[in-house]
Image: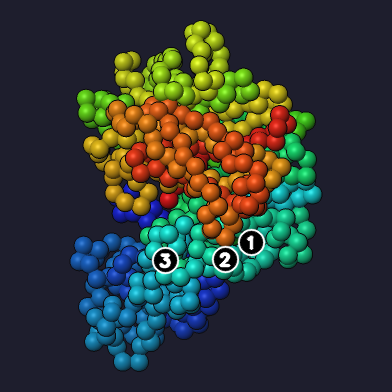
Amino acid sequence: MAINVEMFSNVKGKSGFFKAIGHPMVVSRANDLIARLRAAGHVVIYDPQGFVAGLNEFYNLSGLNIDAVYVQKLEDIGQTRLGHVLRPVTELPQSTARILLVTSFDAGRLIDHIRHLVPQGMQVMSLDELRLPDSMLTNRSFYLDPLNFATNFGFMREGDNIHMRMATCDYWSGLGAAGLPRIWCCLFGMQGEVLAQWEEQVAAAGASIVFDSREIRQRFGLGEFVGSLFIHVIGVARHDVVKYALDVYGDEPSVLSCSHDANAWPSDLFAGLPAPDNDETVIMWIQNSHPVPIPPDTIGINLMGHSEVRKVPVEIPPYGIYGMDVGQFFPEARWPQQFEVQAGRHFVRPRYEVFVKGGRDRMAHVNVERNDLVADPKIPELTQLLGKSYILPAPILPVDRWNSVMQPNPMSTAQINLPYKAIFYDATGVEVGQHHFGCLPRDASVAVDINAILDEQAVRLPSGSGHVELVYDFSSGGVGDGWIHGLFRYTQLASGHKAETSFGAHVYNTVLTYRNEPQSYINVAPGLSTRLFLRLGDAHLDTFCHLIYPASTPWHAESDTMLILFDRMGNEVARTSLRIPCGGSRHWYYSELFDAATRQRAGEAAYIMIRDLTCRLFGYHGTVHGETSFCMDHMFGF
């Protein structure tokens, strides 16, 4: 059963309410409020904003002696909430209850409106009793402002030969934050127990922000753990999303992987979870993101395009973690088959780890599967004005050192078929070949070896690397909804080490707009500039970046890309520039573009900001340990 709390709507936007009532610091206050209401006897509820059902999902109100539920909107009257037929608040004077609970934050004005209706002797309470301290609020005048709840979960696993590091930087100071942000942190264990709790001050404007499982273990005297790190950034501006890169490293050089942030809004569905290959075990880590248990037989997975759902039979505690071995649920499934995750809005975007027999493990993430889309009949017509329109770009890593594989992933419930083709480009922007998938049915699980296709078509990449664009192809029929997704798997030929990444399509580099495309992170469309964060690996690792300049229609002939190197305190150390051909790409290394003396001045926890005011680039980052191991995922911007 899905949690009945609105979390994110592509129509209404972000909801601050579920974060406000589900914040770990609020749980004890909410339980105390419910206990006092229970002890008071008869209670009535005024629910002018429709929040009471969501409150009930997190804090069971069934034990309260509720006489009536009142509402303000005439259109709500006669509906049912908490088992009560909703009544107009103008009937409140007839109540003999001892307490009126107003299920809103910033409730003072709402209470003033009905104060003349409150019977003498009736105590009025509201959700303002659950408010975080003012010192933790960015906007004290509007409590449910998403900026007050710039929160996210990170996955952390700490052992004797495996450590995890979350890395980002203070991007809020550059967006107009009034002072240096602070970060409130709470680390939960697998049973939802609090392992550690602390607060950190961002050191300087633009400074690196790093959470390292090994350092946390030492600081708090912990043993090995599998943990969920809740982070709340206080004092943000313009951007309430907490983004980060998650790195996996170990004492052995073969332990190396990375992944993206968790996406802060729990979803009904996720997709793009791969089945294991013959020598693999795939574990999807479910991080309960709420202060209530996930009941048994609530979370499940099914083979993509198939209706049989096999469910997790155990309860997952509040804020607890469960490692779901997909092979135990579907022992018959093998790569390239893929799964759909029935999540019911109980957890944020999960990570999965692929454990390979004999070592060489890797981590990646699934993606949000949209259930609010429908087929868009206009998409086939967009080529007249938007050229290729929606493009999913991904690297073809240097073919002499890596093998590249692509797999389309259904990522919305509207995608009954996938009418796609892949276009291959050399780094210079020259098209060198195509692969037509045709109109794939939803249950098709097709993985295509890009290197093999290039060999079969006798295609050479003059630059040695390039990129692939997954785009619509309606020549064989089919429908589209603009939500093209794919998984891309890479193998280092010398070591056999693998990494994988998945992402979705956007419209790139056209002044014409369609819906919210070309997308901009902090403004309305069109998004025609670049601001990408590149975290840098430890000194013994080299960092690589694969920048792609996709264009739905012809754009500027070359990019004007600036790479700005910052040290951990946010001080600029050096900068250099790149020119990438329109429709092309550039595979480059930290050690190539910045000399040893400059890298030494930058030091540990340095990062690079990739800026371009002329075009929108897309990027992939990774680190490499010689010919021993590497990691890779897509980058994020803000």
Q: Residues within 10 Å of mark 2 (few under 14, many from 20)?
A: some
Q: Which residue is mark 3?
A: 177
Which residue bears the numbered disc 1?
187
Q: Earlier in the sequence, mark 2 or mark 1?
A: 1
Quadrant in the rendering for residue 209: bottom right
**What is the C-alpha distance between the residues marked 3 and 1?**
26 Å
Residue 88 vs 230, above or below: the answer is below
The quarter of the picture where residue 212 lies is: bottom right
Q: Classify mark 2: helix, strand or loop.
A: loop
**Residue 313, percent from left and from top:** 62, 46
Specify whether residue 64 is in view. Answer: no
Q: Which residue, as the protein is rendered here, is positioned at the far left?
A: 74
Name the residue nearer the viewer: 556 or 2.
556
The residue lying at 78 percent from left, 58 percent from top is 223
Q: CA distance from mark 2 to mark 1?
A: 21 Å
- Residue under the point 75% across and 38% down: 253
Question: Is 619 left or right of 73, judged from the image as shown?
Answer: right
Task: Tell us which disc is closer to us: 2 or 1.
Answer: 2
Q: At which x and y percent is residue 344? A: 48, 48
Quick check: 98 above or below 551?
Answer: below
Of 548 and 305, nearer the camera is: 548
Q: CA distance from mark 3 to mark 2?
A: 14 Å
Q: Earlier in the sequence, mark 3 or mark 1?
A: 3
Name the residue that disc number 2 marks. 203
Across and down, in percent, residue 410 comes to 44, 31
How many C-alpha atoms fall within 10 Å of the one at disc 3: few (<14), some, or many (≥20)?
Answer: some
Crowding at dot 1, Cα within 10 Å, few <14 / some 14-19 / many 20+, comes out as: many
- Residue type beneath disc 3: Ala
Tell me if label 2 and label 1 are in contact, CB under 8 Å: no
